[in-house]
Structures are given as C-alpha cells and as structure tokens.
Amino acid sequence: MTPAAVVFYILASLALLSAVMVIWSRNVVHSAIYLVLTFLCVAGVYIVLRAEFVAAVQVLVYAGGIVVLFLFVIMLVNLAGTLGPRVRVHATVSAIVGCAAVALLLYVSASGGLDTDFGARIDLSAQGGNLQAVGWALYSDYLLPFEIASLLLLVAMIGAIVLARQKY
Amino acid sequence: MVEYVPILIFLGVATLFPVATLVIARLLRPSVYNKTKLEAYECGVPPSGEARARYPVRFYIIAVLFVVFDVETIFLFPWAVKFKALGVFGFIEMLVFLGILLVGFAYAWKKGALEWV
C-alpha cells in the first residue's frame, strides 16, 4: 500500500466516523462540530487526490461558511424538548438508500472505475499547477455553469432576505 | 504528497499538545468541587437562563451574505492567476459574474438587510 493510500484510508474512515457522530450525537451543536471534522477530512482526501484548490475551497466554504450557517440556524430555532431518540430514521427509506449506495459502489469497483492510484498519474505542472488548471477550465470550457453559479448565489441571497424580512 | 509531510507533523503536534496538557493537568490538579466552582464564570451579574437562547433571524441574513461573498471571492482566485491568458473575454466574463451578484447586494442594501437597528 502506498503512503497516499494509507493517508486516504485514515482520512476516509475518520470522515465516516465523524459523519456517523453528526447524526449520533444528542447535542445539535456537537453535531455541527463533528460536521466540521467531516469537512476537514474530506479536504484532506482532496489533497491526497491532488485537488489542492478544491481542498482549500472545502476548508474555506464548507468548514468555514456553511457550518457558520448551520450554527446560526441551530441558534435561530427553539431546540428545547426536541432531543428525542438518538437516531430517528425511517427504516424502509434508509434500507433502500443504503442498498442503492452499496450497489452503486460495487458496480463502480467491479467495472474498474475506481481510481486506485489516488491521482498519482495526474500531472498538472504543464498548466502551471492545480489552481491554474482549474482557472483555465472554469473560465473557458465551463463558462456557462460559472455564470449560472452567480445566479444561484443571487437566488440564495434574495431568498434569505425575503424569508427573514420583518416588514412586508 | 511529500510536501504535505510538515503539515501532517504540524497536525500531529497540534492534536497531541492539548491532549497532553489536559492529561497532565488532570493528573496534577486537586479535584475538589463545590457549587460556586461549577457555576458558569461570568463577570458582573449572576448568569440566568440557558446559553442556547434563540437569536434574531437577522444573524442568518448576515451569515448567508457572508457565505455568498465568500464563494464570490473564491471564484476570483482561479480567475486572477489566469487573468492574462484569459484576456478581455475573461475580464467581461468576471464583470457579468460580479454584476449579477451586485444586483443581490443592491437588493440587500435597498431592503435594509445590512442595517442593524
């Protein structure tokens, strides 16, 4: 097993473990903190896969911004008396989703679609590194999705203001 | 991958240091508790109520605006490093992107979402 594989398996299992703790912990704020750990582990996985820019974005946006958003929502709603059983799951739905996920993973690994060398053959030095490659792809080939992303952000912003406004 | 070894070492030290400090402190300190000692430390008035009180919804708008402009800034990074290669087209592209977000900013401003009182 290569060092990259070792690091990947450590990070992946830590991410899964903290993800389980997100739904397992009784305190919602603790769940949010475990979510930060999950996001950070996923960022580490991105680094192992040689996607440094995505890793930085993962830390800045998800571990930073999104979790702050979650914490604000936790602080907005009244949580007293809502701490019921540890995990409330709909058995049928979770069984279907779980089986589908396992089937998908088995299918992908059986068809050889899994990248077992963890991006070791990816060499972006010709394009000047990861960030340059992302920049070039984003602003030439993926121009339309990029502009649509700004509309998405606009909708999020206006939606939040409309929902939270006090005067109608 | 090798260039990330210092970060791994840093992470290891950063994790071990507080754990070691807490363990050593637990071994050394006397553990005598009384009511006053277990109370939340607060300067001035005695604490009342729970820490998890509900907050005004205005904080949520601020958080959403923060995330939106956070993402906007992140989109600027890959654009900035490829600025020369992208040329005028890339510049206009980014102006459109920023223009669309500026509409949202103007809306937030006009609706008074940025005013606190």
Image: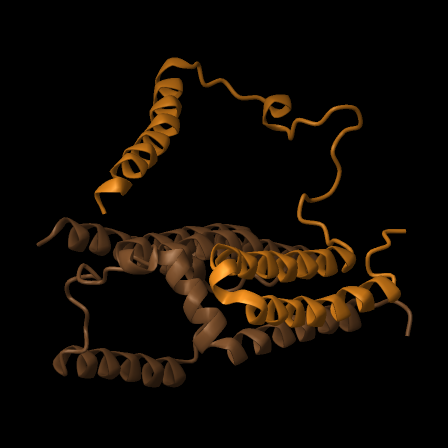
Chain colours: A brown, B orange
Q: Where is residue B94? Give x, y as percent.
A: 61, 67
User: Total marks drawn?
Assistant: 0
* Left or right of A162 in this view: A33: left
**What's the residue at 43%, 80% (across, down)?**
A90
Q: Nearer the viewer, residue A115 or B88?
A: B88
Establish if B14 lies above or below B82: above
Q: Toward which corner of the image does residue A19 lie, by quadrant? A: bottom left
Q: Where is residue A48? Give x, y as percent.
A: 26, 54
Q: Nearer the viewer, residue B115 or B78?
A: B78
* Left or right of A95 in this view: A33: right
**What's the residue at 76%, 60% (across, down)?**
B57
Q: Nearer the viewer, residue A82 or A93?
A: A93
Q: Where is residue A10? Give x, y as percent.
A: 23, 51
**What's the residue at 54%, 73% (across, down)?**
A146
Q: Where is residue A165? Give x, y as percent.
A: 83, 68
Establish if A168 lies above or below B110: below
Q: Looking at the image, can residue A21 be seen?
A: no
Q: Toward which corner of the image does residue B15 lie, by quadrant? A: top left
Q: Looking at the image, can residue B17 be seen?
A: yes
Q: Nearer the viewer, residue B115 or A57?
A: A57
